[in-house]
Image (cartoon, rainbow, N blue to C red):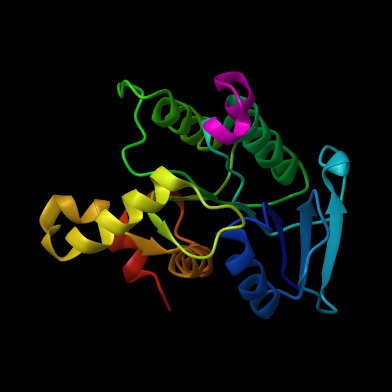
Amino acid sequence: MAKTAVIAGATGLVGSHLLPLLCEHYDQVAAFTRRPLSFSVPNLRELPFTDLHNSWGPTDDAYCCLGITIAKAGSKEAFLAVDHDLVIDFAKAARTNGARQFAVVSSVDASHSCPLFYLKVKAKMEDAVSHLGYDSVHIAQPSFLLGQRDQARTMEQLGIVVAKAIGPLLIGPLSRYRAITAHDVAAAMLEAAKQGKPGVHRMLYRDLMNNVA
């Protein structure tokens, strides 16, 4: 029986690595994008975000790599609209189209009790997608992401340099803060879906690396 997947955020840092992997593994892949994809294969179809709430056909697994910084969004409200509202809208739509698994990129230290607005929003998003009736929810919680970005972010790049330098010193519980490549996060998300363990699973650095096929 043919397996299908849908992805939102396929042009982002993690999504651009995940999309080719999905096309290798699934018979059919649908990608919601705001700009044309640079990647094209016969089993891939592009869908505009305006069709997000429509029926796009039977789906087995859904992957979400949507995300933006507060600085790039321009305000907390605009950030919330993407990293929470749009993610939830996509998760609900995918579930309506029959998806049984949902994999999403969040962040290390996502918590309702954290004073940082960014991490509170991530925690709220995680809780919401975990209660939509999916058989399996796979939540990637990376720290600094390594990879080629469309736009340079000075503070983020500085943080990555520091994270790479101190990575070997981060052992035990601190290993969660090790920098990780976007490709490894993407590969771990796909591998988690392949395993299909029921329930909600949060993947920190070591969990992600253990899932890299």
Read off the magenta span: 71-79
**Left or right, 69 with reference to 50:** left
Residue 211 to residue 107: above or below: below
Percent across and percent down for residue 141 are 39, 49
144 part of magenta stretch: no
Label total for image:
0
Q: Name which quarter of the figure residue 170 lies in.
A: bottom left
Question: Which residue is rendered at x = 16% and y = 51% of the image?
Answer: 174
Q: Is residue 125 left or right of residue 74?
A: left
Q: Nearer the viewer, residue 153 or 119?
A: 153
> Dominant secondary structure of the magenta stretch?
helix
Whether residue 203 appears in this view of the structure is no
Q: Is residue 75 magenta?
A: yes
- For the point 68% across and 58% down, the residue is 10
Quarter of image, res 51: top right
Residue 136: percent from the left, percent from the top?
51, 51
Picture coordinates of residue 88 (x, y %)?
Answer: 63, 34
Q: Please name whichever residue, 61 or 164, is drawn nearer the observer in this view of the structure.
A: 164
Q: Position of residue 176 (x, y in %)?
A: 25, 52
